[in-house]
C-alpha cells in the first residue's frame, strides 16, 4: 500500500467522540465511566492505525458501526468481570479449576448478611471489648471434632505452613518419604517446610515405612512428627505405613507432638456411599494425634480455608504466631465457614443442604430421574432435531485431590450433534452465558447431572440453542 493510500485510511479513522456517542456503545456508556471508556476507544483506534500501516486494515474496517461494536466488545474484555459463574457438567464434584465446593444456601445468606453491614468480627459483645475472630469457629470445630481447641487460616497449605513455623522453626520434622506429596499448583511438602524454617527429616522408603523408622530418627532436635494423608494418589502392592495409633504412641512415649495433614477434611462417614479411603477428622483426633489440619472447601463443603484442630497449648502457640495474622481469613470467608459448620449441627444433617455432600450422596434412582428429565428437555427444544440424545453410563469423581481410587457411577446425557462436531459444540457451550463446562467422548458432548445444580437444569436447552447458533456463525 502506498503512502497516499495509507494517509487516506488514517484520515478515515473515526474520532474518539464519534465512537463514544455511537448507539452501539450505549450499553458500555451505562456500564463504565466515560474516562475509562474513552481509554478503550483510544486503544481500539490505535490498533486500527497500526493495522493500516501494516496493511491489515481496509476501508470497510473503519466504518463507525464496526468500530463502535469493536469498542463495546473490547470494553467488556478489559473492564468487565472475568470471574464468572459456570455450570459444571463434568461430574467432578470438588472441581479445583471451577472453584471447588458450591456453598450451602444458608452459607450464602450469612455472607450477604455479614457483608452488608458491620459485625462483631473481633468484638466481644458480652464484655464490651476487643475479641478474637477465631472464637466464632473454634466452638463449632471443637464440638464437631472432639479437639481441645481450633483455629482457621485462609487455606490448608497456610495451615501447614503456620504449624511448621510455630512448632518446629529451626528444628527437625520427621516425615515418611511416601508422604512427601505434591498437589496442584506445584505445592510440595518439602518446599513448604523449607519456607517455614523447619528441617525435613525423611524416614522409610517410598512404599514402606515402619514405626522403628520414626523412632530411630528421633533426636534432641526433633520438634514434630508429621503424617500427610496422600489424598490425591495411592501406592498399591507391597506397602506399609505407620497407623495413627502407632504414630500417636510414638509421640506420647517420646513427648514429641504429632500432626496429621488430612487435606480434604471430612467430618462424615462416606463408607455407605462406597467411599472408604477418607479418614474423618473426628477419628484422627480420637486416635490421639495432637494437631490435625484440613481444608474447608473440599469434602467439608465450605469456602476456601485451612482449619487446625488439636491440643490447646499447640493451637495457642500457632494462634499467637506472627504468621497467623498474615494468613488469617477475612470476615466473608469466616461467615461462610461458620454457616457451613452449622449445617453439621442441624437435625437433618449436612447431606440435606451442603451441595458437595448432596452430590456425593445422590442415589442411582435420583440420578436417573435427573438424566431423563434433562434428555427430554433437550429433545423437545427447538434444536432437538439437530441432535441425537442418548443416556449412557458414566463415572464421576469427588475431585479436589480426594479419593483418587473411588468412582461415582451414574448415567450421563450424551449429546451427538448431527450437523456440527462435538468439539465445536463443546467450545460454543463453554463460551455461552453462563458458560457450560462439559466433557467430550466419541464425538458426543457429555452432561453429568450429578454436578448440575437443580436451578441450572432449566437453562440447558437455551444454552444449546445459543451454542448451535454460534456454531453456524463460524462455519
Image (tube, helix red, strand yellow):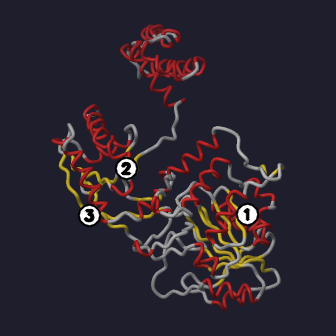
The crowding category of the residue bearing disc 1, from other C-alpha atoms within 10 Å (few below 14, some 14 to 19, many at least 20), is: many
Q: Earlier in the sequence, mark 3 or mark 2?
A: 3
In the image, taking residue 190 as reference, residue 431 lies left or right, namely left
CA gap between label 2 and label 1 equals 39 Å
> What mark, if any, has residue 454 been given in the picture?
2
Residue at point 46% right, 22% down?
72
Q: Earlier in the sequence, mark 2 or mark 1?
A: 1
Task: From the top left corner, tell me how far across and down residue 272 is, in percent.
Answer: 41, 74
Task: From the top left corner, tell me how far across and down residue 134 is, in percent.
Answer: 72, 58
Q: Observer-nearest residue: 475 or 169?
A: 169
The crowding category of the residue bearing disc 3, from other C-alpha atoms within 10 Å (few below 14, some 14 to 19, many at least 20), is: few
In the image, taking residue 260 as reference, residue 208 lies left or right, namely left
Judging from the image, what secondary structure is the residue with disc 2 in? helix
Residue farthest bottom in this picture: 212
Task: From the top left corner, tell me how far across and down residue 345 is, in percent.
Answer: 56, 63
Residue farthest left in this picture: 385
> What mark, if any, has residue 393 been given in the picture?
3
CA gap between label 3 and label 2 equals 21 Å
Residue at point 69% right, 88% down?
249
**Circles 1 and 3: CB atoms closer than 8 Å:** no
Quarter of the picture holding the C terminus = top left
Write down the residue under mark 1.
162
Q: Earlier in the sequence, mark 1 or mark 3?
A: 1
Quarter of the picture holding the N terminus = top left
Q: Nearer the viewer, mark 3 or mark 2?
A: 2
Q: Observer-nearest residue: 29 or 129?
A: 129
Amino acid at each position: 500500500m502506498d503512502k497516499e493510500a495509507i494517509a487516506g485510511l488514517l484520515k478515515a479513522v473515526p474520532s474518539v467522540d464519534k465512537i463514544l456517542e455511537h448507539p452501539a456503545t450505549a450499553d458500555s456508556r451505562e456500564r463504565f465511566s466515560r474516562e475509562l471508556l474513552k481509554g478503550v476507544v483510544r486503544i481500539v483506534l490505535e490498533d486500527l492505525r497500526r493495522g493500516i500501516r501494516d496493511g491489515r486494515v481496509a476501508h470497510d474496517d473503519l466504518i463507525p458501526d464496526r468500530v463502535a461494536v469493536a469498542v463495546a466488545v473490547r470494553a467488556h474484555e478489559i473492564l468487565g468481570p472475568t470471574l464468572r459463574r459456570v455450570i459444571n457438567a463434568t461430574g467432578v464434584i470438588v472441581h479445583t479449576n471451577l472453584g471447588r465446593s458450591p456453598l450451602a444456601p444458608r452459607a450464602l445468606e450469612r455472607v450477604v448478611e455479614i457483608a452488608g453491614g458491620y459485625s462483631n468480627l473481633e468484638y466481644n459483645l458480652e464484655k464490651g471489648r476487643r475479641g478474637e475472630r477465631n472464637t466464632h469457629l473454634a466452638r463449632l470445630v471443637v464440638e464437631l471434632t472432639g479437639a481441645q481447641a481450633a483455629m482457621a487460616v485462609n487455606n490448608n497449605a497456610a495451615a501447614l505452613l503456620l504449624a511448621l513455623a510455630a512448632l518446629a522453626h529451626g528444628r527437625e520434622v520427621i516425615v515418611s518419604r511416601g508422604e512427601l506429596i505434591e498437589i496442584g499448583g506445584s505445592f510440595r511438602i518439602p518446599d513448604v517446610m523449607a519456607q517455614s524454617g523447619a528441617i525435613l527429616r525423611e524416614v522409610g522408603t517410598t512404599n514402606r515405612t515402619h514405626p522403628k523408622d520414626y523412632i530411630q530418627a528421633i533426636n534432641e532436635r526433633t520438634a514434630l512428627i508429621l503424617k500427610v494423608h496422600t489424598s490425591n494418589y495411592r501406592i498399591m502392592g507391597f506397602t506399609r505405613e505407620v497407623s495413627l495409633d502407632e504414630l500417636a504412641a510414638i509421640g506420647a512415649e517420646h513427648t514429641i507432638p504429632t500432626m496429621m495433614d488430612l487435606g480434604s477434611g471430612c467430618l462424615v462417614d462416606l463408607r455407605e456411599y462406597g467411599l472408604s479411603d477418607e479418614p474423618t477428622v473426628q477419628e484422627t483426633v480420637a486416635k490421639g494425634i495432637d494437631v490435625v489440619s484440613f481444608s474447608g472447601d473440599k469434602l467439608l463443603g465450605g469456602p476456601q480455608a485451612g482449619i487446625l484442630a488439636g491440643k490447646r497449648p499447640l493451637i495457642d502457640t500457632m494462634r499467637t504466631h506472627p504468621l497467623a495474622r498474615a494468613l488469617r481469613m477475612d470476615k466473608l470467608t469466616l461467615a461462610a465457614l461458620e454457616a457451613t459448620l452449622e449445617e453439621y449441627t442441624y437435625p437433618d444433617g449436612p447431606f440435606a443442604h451442603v451441595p458437595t455432600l448432596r452430590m456425593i450422596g445422590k442415589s442411582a434412582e435420583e440420578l436417573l430421574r435427573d438424566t431423563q428429565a434433562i434428555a427430554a428437555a433437550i429433545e423437545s427444544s427447538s434444536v432437538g432435531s439437530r441432535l441425537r440424545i442418548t443416556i449412557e453410563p458414566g463415572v464421576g469423581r469427588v475431585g479436589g485431590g480426594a479419593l483418587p481410587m473411588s468412582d461415582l457411577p451414574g448415567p450421563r446425557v450424551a449429546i451427538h450433534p448431527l450437523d456440527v462436531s462435538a468439539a465445536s459444540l463443546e467450545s460454543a457451550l463453554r463460551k455461552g452465558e453462563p458458560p457450560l463446562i462439559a466433557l467430550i467422548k466419541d464425538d458426543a458432548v457429555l452432561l453429568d447431572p450429578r454436578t448440575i445444580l437443580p436451578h441450572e437444569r432449566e437453562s440447558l436447552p437455551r444454552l444449546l440453542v445459543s451454542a448451535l447458533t454460534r456454531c453456524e456463525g463460524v462455519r
